[in-house]
Image (cartoon, coloured by chain):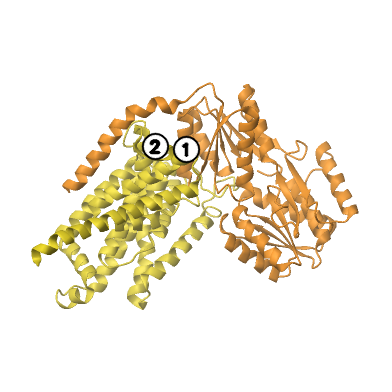
Chain colours: A orange, B yellow
């Protein structure tokens, strides 16, 4: 017991010793524009998280900002890191997912000089905004392209977990496919996580064995397994999500449904830096050119008249003459 | 060097870092470490603390959501109690399987972890989903269900005090009570305890299982009541597994678990700071944490060997 007490005493002295030393260094230089990013997964996923990190890098390069990134897993960590960044005088803190919105609501009022932005979600406040992406619009276009390529008449959507934006995107994909081929079947599967590439591959193989020949995956790091499965199969196609994933497996990737996160992040960061920031749900859609369907330029399987149809729909999204029948993405 | 400084600062560098980061992270590890330790002391390899935590969290969240208008003095103890019961019920399944059918608890508890995780995922998409039915999470609890903070302006909550009490209580129980002695006897050698000591091994093991589950359940209640104030999936980053290291590093001694839980909490908090302040990638952080644990274990082994060598000539 005495040993325990001694250990606690040492820890306590250490805290007292360092408590005064670090306060000054933590504050940093106030004139520098500081931006932080919290991602829910690894930035090596070539999708949701890696494109967010590229957005952070673009903010650094274009606006001369000092940047910091952390990967967080649990709601408790979201809040703790929001607080730490607020205390360090960061100007903009981006929580990369709707799951960060509760933490932003709780921490935002404590640090009024920091702007908290969540990618997705609907929560706003004096210094809190949410980014919303009309990811369903390009998903609809991808559905059209995929349906015209499918031989078997069976396609599949493969997600990480059942999150609202993912489900909305899959619904739009199916609606797009059925708009050109009413009898087409779309299978749905969820991996159960966003980082297990082996599990992603298993699920993709299972879908392929059920004769699906186009897989629209949206599973970040786990989704990379789907690319492997389709590549080994060789007779089917895969569609990327969130980032331009056409280079992951160029010979079998039909295209990617892209959110241009670097562009979106830069727009928000510029607002905050210039002081023109207003708290709101900031919607980025086809019109603002943040979301788009990017066909793989190396493949020629999408026929020209389909390309033209997609292009005309894209133009209608931009001028507002065509809106999706499904409810807008949350 | 800068990275190590960040590690230190993030864990102990400021009052906020210590009270609100390190100790808040240490709280579930403390309760779960005790849960693992009490089971291991009786030779029960309960790997299921993770699942028991999730069940405790879900049950406590259900209470908090259903009785949000009750006074805090009633609601918080009710969350503790129901969390403990739910955790015990979950470990009770494994206990029953072992006693009735001889199913190895290592297998059953691990499997029950997966079931528990899936159950929470289902709850936050089904019966306990927030009213707009968009996000996979429950509504936020009413204020009365927020566990009290222990210090003004810090995030440290009641759960840590419960953990310290439990550590002390468990130590006393194991060392100074007849029931605790039976637990240690069964852990030391079940057959000897039964034949020489007349201990009812099956009953002792079942009871330890329930106690272990209850402690883990309280850890779950403490996470939702003290930290998140809502039920989410992905509530625990694998606390139940880290807790095994916490308990083993403390050689299953409840008093030392207090120290090792704070140690792991500090590593966790420091690791976050390493990412934030020194921009060390998270995988590198995990490697550093693993190396620190290995170093501590190795140091202890070397120390033990030196003691043995010093003792050897005297006996010769």
Would residue A282 be found to the left or right of residue A324 on screen? left
Q: Secondary structure at mark 2?
A: helix
Q: Is residue A279 in sight in this rendering?
A: yes
Above or below, comparing residue A33 to residue A156 in the picture: above
- Mark 2, Cα crowd under 10 Å, few <14 / some 14-19 / many 20+, is some
Would residue A10 be found to the left or right of residue B235 on screen? left
Above or below, comparing residue B21 to residue A144 in the picture: above
Q: Return the x and y of residue B122 as percentages of the image width and height.
A: 53, 57
Image quadrant containing the C terminus of chain B? bottom left
Q: Earlier in the sequence, mark 1 or mark 2?
A: 2
Q: Are marks 1 and 2 in contact (CB under 8 Å)?
A: yes
Image quadrant containing the N terminus of chain B? top left
- The chain letter under disc 2 is B
| Residue at far right of view | A305
Q: CA distance from mark 1 to mark 2?
A: 9 Å
Above or below, comparing residue B177 to residue B4 in the picture: below
- Label placed on residue A263: none
Same chain for marks 1 and 2? Answer: yes
- The chain letter under disc 1 is B
The residue lying at 9 percent from left, 63 percent from top is B314
Q: What residue is disc 1 on?
A: B278
Q: Return the x and y of residue B12 as percentages of the image width and height.
A: 34, 37
Q: What residue is disc 2 on?
A: B5
């Amino acid at each position: 017991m005495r040993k325990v007490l001694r250990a606690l005493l040492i820890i306590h002295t250490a805290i007292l010793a360092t408590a005064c030393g670090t306060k000054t260094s933590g504050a940093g230089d106030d004139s520098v524009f500081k931006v932080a990013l919290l991602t829910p997964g690894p930035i090596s996923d070539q999708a949701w998280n890696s494109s967010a990190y590229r957005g952070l890098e673009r903010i650094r390069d274009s606006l001369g900002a000092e940047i910091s990134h952390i990967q967080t897993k649990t709601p408790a960590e979201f809040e703790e890191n929001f607080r730490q960044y607020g205390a360090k005088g960061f100007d903009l803190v981006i929580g990369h997912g709707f799951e960060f919105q509760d933490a932003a609501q709780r921490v935002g009022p404590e640090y009024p000089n920091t702007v908290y932005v969540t990618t997705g979600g609907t929560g706003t406040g004096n210094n809190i905004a949410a980014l919303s992406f009309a990811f369903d619009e390009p998903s609809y276009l991808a559905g059209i392209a995929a349906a015209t390529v499918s031989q078997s008449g069976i396609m599949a959507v493969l997600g990480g977990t059942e999150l609202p934006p993912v489900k909305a995107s899959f619904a739009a994909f199916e609606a797009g496919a059925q708009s050109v081929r009413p009898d087409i079947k779309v299978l749905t599967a969820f991996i159960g996580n966003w980082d297990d590439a082996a599990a992603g591959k298993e699920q993709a193989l299972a879908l392929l064995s059920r004769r699906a020949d186009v897989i629209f995956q949206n599973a970040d790091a786990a989704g990379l397994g789907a690319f492997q499965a389709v590549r080994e199969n060789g007779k089917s196609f895969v569609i990327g999500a969130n980032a331009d994933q056409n280079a992951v497996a160029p010979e079998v990737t039909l295209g990617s449904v892209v959110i241009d996160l670097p562009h979106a992040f830069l727009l928000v960061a510029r607002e905050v830096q210039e002081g023109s920031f207003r708290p709101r749900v900031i919607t980025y859609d086809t019109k603002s050119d943040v979301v788009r369907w990017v066909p793989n330029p190396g493949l020629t399987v999408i026929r020209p008249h389909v390309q033209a149809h997609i292009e005309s729909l894209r133009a209608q999204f931009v001028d507002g003459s065509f809106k999706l029948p499904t409810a807008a993405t949350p | 060097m800068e990275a190590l400084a960040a590690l230190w600062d993030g864990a102990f560098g400021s009052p906020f870092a210590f009270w609100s980061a390190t100790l808040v992270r240490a709280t579930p590890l403390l309760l779960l470490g005790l849960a693992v330790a009490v089971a291991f002391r009786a030779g029960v390899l309960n790997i299921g603390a993770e699942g028991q935590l999730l069940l405790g969290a879900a049950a406590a969240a259900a209470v908090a959501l259903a009785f949000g208008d009750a006074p805090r003095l009633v609601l918080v103890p009710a969350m503790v109690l129901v969390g403990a019961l739910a955790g015990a019920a979950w470990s009770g399944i494994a206990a029953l399987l072992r006693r009735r059918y001889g199913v190895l608890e290592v297998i059953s508890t691990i499997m029950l972890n997966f079931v528990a995780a899936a159950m929470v995922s289902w709850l936050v998409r089904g019966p306990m989903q927030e009213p707009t039915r968009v996000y996979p999470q429950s509504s936020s609890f009413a204020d009365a269900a927020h566990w009290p903070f222990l210090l003004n302006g810090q995030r440290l909550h009641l759960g840590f005090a419960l953990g310290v009490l439990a550590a002390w209580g468990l130590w006393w129980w194991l060392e100074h009570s007849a029931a605790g002695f039976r637990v240690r006897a069964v852990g030391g050698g079940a057959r000897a305890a039964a034949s020489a000591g007349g201990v009812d091994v099956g009953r002792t093991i079942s009871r330890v299982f329930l106690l272990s589950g209850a402690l883990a359940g309280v850890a779950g209640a403490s996470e939702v009541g003290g930290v998140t104030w809502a039920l989410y999936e992905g509530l625990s980053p694998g606390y139940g597994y880290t807790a095994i290291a916490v308990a083993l590093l403390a050689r299953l001694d409840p008093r030392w678990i207090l120290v090792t839980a704070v140690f792991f909490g500090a590593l966790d908090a420091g690791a976050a700071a390493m990412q934030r302040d020194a921009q060390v990638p998270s995988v590198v952080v995990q490697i550093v944490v693993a190396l620190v644990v290995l170093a501590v274990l190795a140091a202890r082994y070397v120390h033990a060997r030196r003691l043995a060598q010093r003792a050897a000539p005297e006996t010769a």
